[in-house]
Amino acid sequence: MMVPRWLAAGLLAVLAGCSGPGSDAAPDVKVDLSFQPNPPKVGAAEVLVTLADAGGQPLRGAAVKLEGNMNHAGMAPSFADAKEAEPGHYKGELNFTMGGDWFVLVNATLADGRKITRKVDVRGVKR
């Protein structure tokens, strides 16, 4: 079966506009996460996000949002805003609702307007 050209062109345009976790407008930005407690346990965990440029200089003034998800479907995600505690270091709190493997999506708008999305695996959240 042939797909009409207009339909194929439309689908390609939609797919080209989609970006999944890990794609962003600032691939040179380093994003690191750490947790307290470490390793994270079920319940509330403080998340420290560090943003730095390619030279290791802290990136100030970003708006940072966190989304925690389990690796399997069916669990409600956990959301948090991370506030700048010191230059380039942002703190937020996520609630890990059960033990197992999670990932955190870090969505940030940098001071210069660039947007980044990074996926960070969090293996083995303890019960």
Image: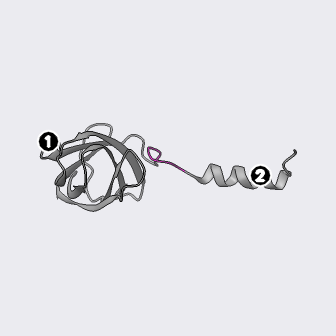
- Secondary structure state at the residue bearing disc 2: helix
| Crowdedness near tag 2: few (<14), some (14–19) or many (≥20) residues, C-alpha within 10 Å | few
Q: Residue at x 72, y 52 (%)?
A: 11
Which mark is drawn over residue 56? none
In this image, 17 relative to 30: left or right?
Answer: right
Which mark is drawn over residue 38? 1
Q: Amino acid at mark 2?
A: Ala
Camera-nearest residue between 120 and 63: 120
In this image, 90 relative to 63: left or right?
Answer: left
**First-in-chain label (2 vs 1):** 2
Q: Amino acid at mark 1?
A: Asn
- Secondary structure state at the residue bearing disc 1: loop
Query: Is 100 part of what is drawn in magenta?
Result: no
The quadrant of the image that shows the N terminus is top right
Q: Residue at x 27, y 62 (%)?
A: 80
Depicted 54 relative to depicted 96: above or below: above
How far is mark 2 from mark 1, CA to CA?
48 Å
Q: Magenta part of the protein: which range? A: 19-23
Give how far across and how far down residue 17 sits, in percent: 60, 53
Residue holding disc 2? 9
Q: Residue at x 53, y 50 (%)?
A: 19
In this image, 90 relative to 11: left or right?
Answer: left
